[in-house]
Image (cartoon, coloured by chain):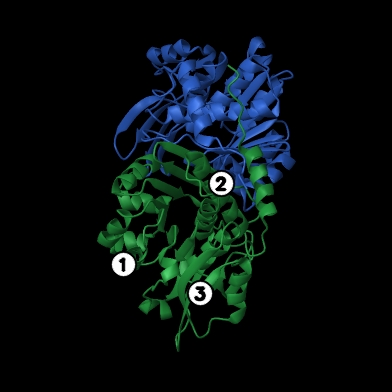
Chain colours: A green, B blue
Amino acid sequence: MSLLVVGSVAYDSVETPHDRRDDALGGSATFFSIAAALFHKPSLVAVVGDDFKSEDVDTLERAGVDMSGLERSAGGRTFRWGGRYSADMNNRDTLFTELNVFEAFKPKLSATHREASLVFLANIQPTLQLSVLEQVGCPRFVAADTMNLWIGGARPALLEVLSHVDALFVNDSEALELTGALTMVAAAAEIRAMGPELVIIKRGEHGALVFNGDDIFYVPAYPLEQVIDPTGAGDTFAGGFMGYLAETGDFTPENVRRAAVVGSLMASFCVEGFSVEGIARLTLDDVRRRYAAFLALTHIDALAL
Amino acid sequence: MSLLVVGSVAYDSVETPHDRRDDALGGSATFFSIAAALFHKPSLVAVVGDDFKSEDVDTLERAGVDMSGLERSAGGRTFRWGGRYSADMNNRDTLFTELNVFEAFKPKLSATHREASLVFLANIQPTLQLSVLEQVGCPRFVAADTMNLWIGGARPALLEVLSHVDALFVNDSEALELTGALTMVAAAAEIRAMGPELVIIKRGEHGALVFNGDDIFYVPAYPLEQVIDPTGAGDTFAGGFMGYLAETGDFTPENVRRAAVVGSLMASFCVEGFSVEGIARLTLDDVRRRYAAFLALTHIDALAL
């Protein structure tokens, strides 16, 4: 099944308690598509400036991403984001955001891209997400991500997006902000009433909760000895999830659970390196090995009472 | 196997965003022993004042707790704690702590209590935990809880306790504070080097991580629609865990995992009511039903790739 992602391709400047990188390859569509490509070739639609390096195009192409939808804005400068993480890596401050070419971005889908079966609307303005929805035909499965900026500042357009998508990826704090609910169970029920049948609440180092119709599933995060850079973990989760679904074409609750585990494991690889270093050279066997370790980590026998 | 807990019996005044209770039955030994008693009769050693109500003794006895070790300090007043929870219930401020009779508490174990097979040293001063350790014979399994107050202010005594116990229950932030580590995996390894073979890192609404020798196990928290009062959840977790181990007498890694799930589920019942209301009237069938729901919630099939 064909898989499309519309989002950002960016240069990130990241400070962690131990190290820093400037102008490293980043952006929601970048992390998503590199993670997805391990399972199923994704098509990326995004915009960059003249300054976007050919080695970064190479990194995406080598990972197996269809780059025909990458627009180059002549004379423009690629979107840039800078952030600094707290000592425990659970919080970050945005140091700067330069929209640059992203400010005037109007996603235009090719005839092929309009026929995508699975679509991921990465975290961009809800009005842009809506313009993508208007261009695609009849996708089998559409998922969206969003953030507090749009929950607070573009609520009507976001609610319109939600009424048209099958799935929402959202952080725990954003789920509470979106709904006013006090628990994840209550928030998920309210989000499902807004449209998406499937709600995936991401909780960073605590994993994710998957509300899939009547099926509720808890995915722990794979415990790591060291976290290098959390940037892109959420988009990588979504990429693993959607890439696995695109490859298997199986939307049963059991397989959606597997997809969520795959997403969580891809995120665990992501945070083990700066930028896309943790995921760009992975093999399917790496994922299979960590999946087996994950099964062992979470296995429980029936109660002996 | 006989089970002993030494800790506090208290009156708690709790404010949540929705409600409040004054002078409700609380204390680490209270929550622990009521939870444990559902599986195996525990003996409680603690001190209260003249003001401790007979109906609260009744609540503990009806739950199946051996109260022969409850000391009444003539003319004294029962330990009191007051706290206020944040809107999302994940943080709380201590409004007051009145040690009262607890200030001069010197646990004295009866001949029977000295023979306990399983011992839980609830969160009290490490020097008191050490005095209990000196009085018990050769217990099969000793677990301790602690808190930031002792990690910062009584570190040498706490390290002495750790060198003598089989298991430590500790919050995630406390595990980092105790070790200076940056991840739970690293913190657990350092704590295990201090003594306990088994380290249980509690993460509130995010569940717990169990490091049992080479066996690492992630226990999600059971997702709830509504949380009424988180007070006592950690002690209730430990009570369910130790009560289940005392009843089954099985310390294999598989059974320690079951015990951790039981502990997590008992904590989920605990937070559904104020004080001990969520656990005082539970039946084993309630636990069996939630355990089955938990298995369904966490079940994953092998990877289909």
Chain for mark 2? A
Q: Considering only vertical position in the picture, is B155 above or below A138?
A: above
Q: Amino acid at mark 3?
A: Ser
Q: Position of residue A30 (x, y in %)?
A: 53, 67
Q: Amino acid at mark 1?
A: Thr
Can residue A234 be seen here?
yes
Q: Amino acid at mark 2?
A: Val
Q: Considering only vertical position in the picture, is B91 above or below B167?
A: below
Of B294 and B26, the residue lying toward us:
B294
Q: Position of residue A66 (x, y in %)?
A: 54, 69
Q: Is residue A75 left or right of residue A54?
A: left
* Same chain assignment for discs 1 and 2: yes
Q: Considering only vertical position in the picture, is B22 above or below A75?
A: above
Where, quadrant-wise, is the C terminus of chain A in this rendering?
A: top right
Mark 1 residue element? helix
Of A47 and A103, the residue lying toward us:
A47
Q: Which residue is mark 3?
A: A68
Q: Position of residue B30 (x, y in %)?
A: 48, 22
Mark toward the viewer: 3 or 2: 3
Of A178 and B187, the residue lying toward us:
A178
Q: Earlier in the sequence, mark 3 or mark 1?
A: 3
Q: Which residue is mark 1?
A: A127
Q: Which residue is mark 2?
A: A261
